[in-house]
Image (spheres, coloured by chain):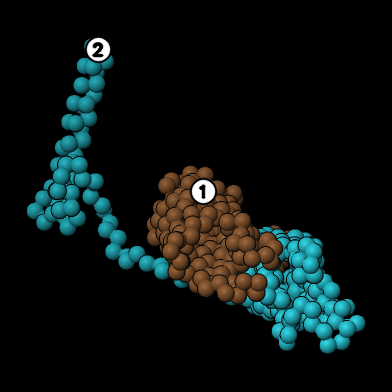
Amino acid sequence: MFVTEPYLELRTGPGRGYPVTQVVGRGESVEILKRRTDWLKVRTERGIEGWAAQRDMVKTLLADGTLLSIDLGDRAGFTSHRWEAGGMVGDFDGANLVSGYLAFSLNDHLKIDLSPSQFLGVTSNAAPADRSGYTLDIGLNHVFVPEWRFSPFVTLGGGLFNVNRDPQNPQAVDLHDQSAYYGAGFRFYLTRRFFVRGEYKNRVVFTSRNDNEELEEWKVGLAFFF
Amino acid sequence: MESRTRLFLLTLAAATTVLPGCASFRWPWQDAPPPAVEPASTDSDNAPPPRVIEPEVERRKIKVAKIDQENIEVGGFYGVMSVDDFGSNPVYGATLTYHVTEDFFFRAEAGQTKLGLTSFEILNPGSDPLNLGTDRRLTYYGLSVGYNFLPGEVFLGRNLAMNSAFYVLGGVGSTKFADDERFTLNFGGGYRILPTDWLAVSIEVQDRVYESDIFGKNELVNNLEAYLGVTVFF
């Protein structure tokens, strides 16, 4: 990479709080070693290593005269990215819910969602709302207008539904079931790589009893894309 | 009217002086074959003017190597955890951190400790009021968001400087013991030193808060832990 600005500052660490110890002059070249968050570790012609800010490095040129292109993690990245992940909290039919998710984008609109969640009863009574257990869902997620800052989506999928054995109700047989869900939610871009995600799911658990069980869950949390 | 005729006369004068010159200049070349660059411009009238020099240098195609991303931090920790009414005991676990920006990170962590004896069990040797049996494990996990602050360098001696930062974090998760699993909030802070770019050593203190009715009445439980962690970036 060739420096075209008057100089390029190199710091001792990948952060703005670390001191600048080197500068690389215009016309000199640096070699990119690795990247951490928004910083690039580079080596100068003289073999000195340091961290340069990504926003400074996008002004450097490749040997063929083109600009270095790096994913900056901005609003455009919110519209179009490969992966996203996050954590959420909420309510699972009366119980507390802790949930994480990882999504892979097939395109800007359609994503495959993998979401493990755990629901935790409020007390240790045997009431249905006080069950604890976990769900593991895989589903499809359709974002209507991905370029909007506030963009709604719908979701559809299925997965496993497991209830922990309750010591006060050891005869319960329906501990491992399958379930399917539909739902809707929203994504709201905050800044950099972060956004808020909230969603509602209506789940049908295919029990071994005569009637299926219908459960409602909602959750909201923080997510990021990469 | 007058200017138009003047323009016409000027053009005529220019033509009479320049054109014969051109003819005499081209005269020795007339029998020579046309230059090789000409055919490109014969395709259409709008084609760009012929290039005098055709560059025959092959453009260098530069393939940019993928930049090695080092945003993930994985490691383990070992320390002490004080569990409400069960005493302080060694705790160990693992963490997985993803650094999203230089300021913020997401972290998943899981840990385990062994419960000590409650005061009731100490006063009544051999009793087991909570029916714990031999399984006196407490396990927990948490999903947290963290924020790095006061980044800088620490100097160890004259020649060694290491990067360091303080951080705070908070999140949600669960705590499991005595056949009971509870929704848990965790928050805390720590200090991280990086001896090299890829290795981090941290000291951290966290509080894990949940509601429990294990002793009959519902109460808020605070479990404090302090530990030393070693993590590797890759």
Pointer 1 chain: A
Q: Which chain is cyan?
A: B
Please count the marks in the image.
Answer: 2
Dots 2 and 1 on the same chain: no
Compare residues A119 and A131 and report the one nearer the observer: A131
Q: Chain of mark 2?
A: B
**Residue carrying label 2:** B2
Q: Quick check: B26 left or right of A18?
A: left
The three-letter amino acid code for the residue at tag 1 is Phe
Residue B14, quarter of the rendered image: top left
Q: Nearer the viewer, mark 2 or mark 1?
A: 1
Per the image, the residue denoted by label 1 is: A186
Amino acid type of the residue that numbered disc 2 sits on in the rendered structure:
Glu
Residue B54 image position (x, y, % from top left): 27, 58
Q: Position of residue B175 (x, y in %)?
A: 70, 70
Rate crowding at label 1 as few (under 14), some (14 to 19) or many (20 or more) other CA atoms within 10 Å. Answer: some
Chain letter for the brown colouring in the rendering: A
| Occupied quadrant, residue B144 | bottom right
Can you see residue A48?
Answer: no
Q: Position of residue B177 (x, y in %)?
A: 71, 75
